[in-house]
Image (tube, grey):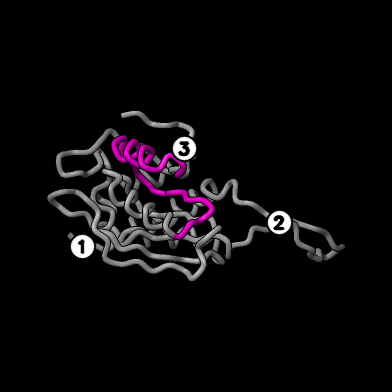
Amino acid sequence: MTQNPQTLHVVDHPLVQHKLTLMRSKTASTNSFRRLLTEVSTLMAYEVTRDVPTQLVEIETPLESMRAPMIDGKKLVLVSILRAGGGILDGVLNVIPGARVGHIGLYRDPDTLEAVEYYFKMPSEVAERDVILVDPMLATGNSIIAAVNRMKELKPRSIKFLCILAAPEGVAALQKAHPDVHIYTAAVDRGLDDHGYIRPGLGDAGDRIFGTK
């Protein structure tokens, strides 16, 4: 499996890695896992938005007027891949509250591991905006590839993907299908098992977020 380091960004900040380790532990409660996911996502939002364009606006400080840089949150569209993407969405919205939000509902067929779409709801204007797709795991890559395929129909200016964990197989598959999409993750693990789970991983992110099995 060949990975393109130019579009793969591993966020190795010590705080991100520390919190990821706490998330991986099987003893982490549902409440702790959910809180840590939000915290890690907030920290990673700084990296995924590092090159977001800014514009100068006129403001008044307590001492004088000046032109200062601001981003236009309305030009950003955060797209959560249901159901687990909501955990990352909350963290990113902590620092970009003005972003538009869309949702894509996908589930993985247990036999074929292919993505099946059941929901698609986007803001009215996505064309020429920057899209950040969010989902905790990049495993086989089938779900995110299907999500990118759908988003490209709306002709956004750019698409990035933010996840917490990735498998080499998923990274390679996404880069092959969409070499223009930059991937941001906290770690690339060893690989996938026969059931398509990331190893060593952290289990099923959706189940751990919602306390289901």
Residue pointed to by mark 2:
55
Q: Is residue 110 left or right of residue 40?
A: left
Of the two numbered discs 2 and 1 in the rendering, the one whose residue sits closer to the viewer: 2
Q: Earlier in the sequence, mark 3 or mark 1?
A: 3
Q: Which mark is residue 212?
A: 1
Q: Nearer the viewer, residue 125 or 81?
A: 125
Q: Earlier in the sequence, mark 3 or mark 2?
A: 3
Residue pointed to by mark 3:
7
Q: Are marks 3 and 2 in contact (CB under 8 Å)?
A: no
Residue drawn 47% across and 49% down?
Answer: 160
Q: Please, what is the three-letter code of the amino acid marked with disc 1? A: Thr
Residue drawn 47% across and 69% down?
Answer: 123
Q: Please, what is the three-letter code of the amino acid marked with disc 3? A: Thr
Magenta range is 154-181
Q: Earlier in the sequence, mark 2 or mark 1?
A: 2
Q: Is residue 63 left or right of residue 134?
A: right
Mark pair 3, 2: CA separation? 26 Å
Q: Please, what is the three-letter code of the amino acid marked with disc 2? A: Gln
SS for callout 1 = loop
Residue drawn 37% across and 57% down?
Answer: 150
